[in-house]
Image: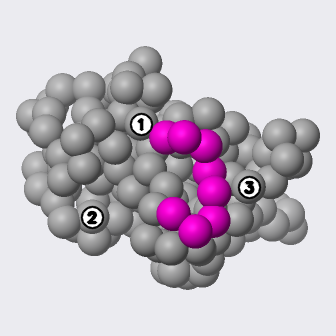
Amino acid sequence: MISEPIVITPESAFEAAVLDAVRDLVRDAGWSYLVVPRFGLDLALFLAREGRAYTRFLEVKVYAARRPGGIGFGTQKGEGPQVELLLCPDQDLALLDTAVRWILADATRPAGSARYALFDCRRAKAAAMGGVRKGKQNNLRMSALQDCFQAWPELLGQLQRFMFN
């Protein structure tokens, strides 16, 4: 069992914990892999098994209540790969959802509780405060993601299914 991280702030600490979990999951599955940090999104995973290659991307976020009820994504000017992804038309988000997941940790909740969420781009776009736009700081509404939160073991199970299915 991959241990739950106790420290999830700053965001780089949670990203490192997710990377460790991903490496353990891939090793346990017996797949070959390459992880490239900051390849557009926080983590790019290149997976291979039995001559087939798969690509998965993870965007890692931590809510620490700096913006009440919201977690920023992209730059303050409304730029960046996260913004570009969520500006795609809804029919194109289904294609993105085969390869991209957002992982959110709520640092205001205690370790061992349901403080992690894994969701797709359609869900992220729907959770964006006031919609996604260039020229402004974009934020995810925490209230729109409340039903996504789960404990660490459940997150690992969802992450494993996303990576290998």
Q: Quadrant of the C terminus?
A: top right
**Residue denoted by label 1:** 141
| Start-end of magenta stretch | 129-136
Badges 2 and 3: C-beta atoms under 8 Å apart? no
Q: Nearer the viewer, mark 2 or mark 3?
A: 3
As drawn, 17 above or below 155? below
Question: How far apart are the alpha carbons under marks 1 and 3?
Answer: 17 Å
Q: Earlier in the sequence, mark 2 or mark 1?
A: 2
Question: How far apart are the alpha carbons under marks 2 and 1?
Answer: 17 Å
Residue drawn at (74%, 45%), measured in percent from left and top? 97
**Residue denoted by label 2:** 11
Where is residue 84 shown, x and y percent of the image?
Answer: 70, 65
Q: Amino acid at mark 2?
A: Glu
Where is residue 96 shown, x and y percent of the image?
Answer: 77, 51
As drawn, 77 above or below 105? below
Question: How far apart are the alpha carbons under marks 2 and 3?
Answer: 24 Å
**Residue denoted by label 3:** 87
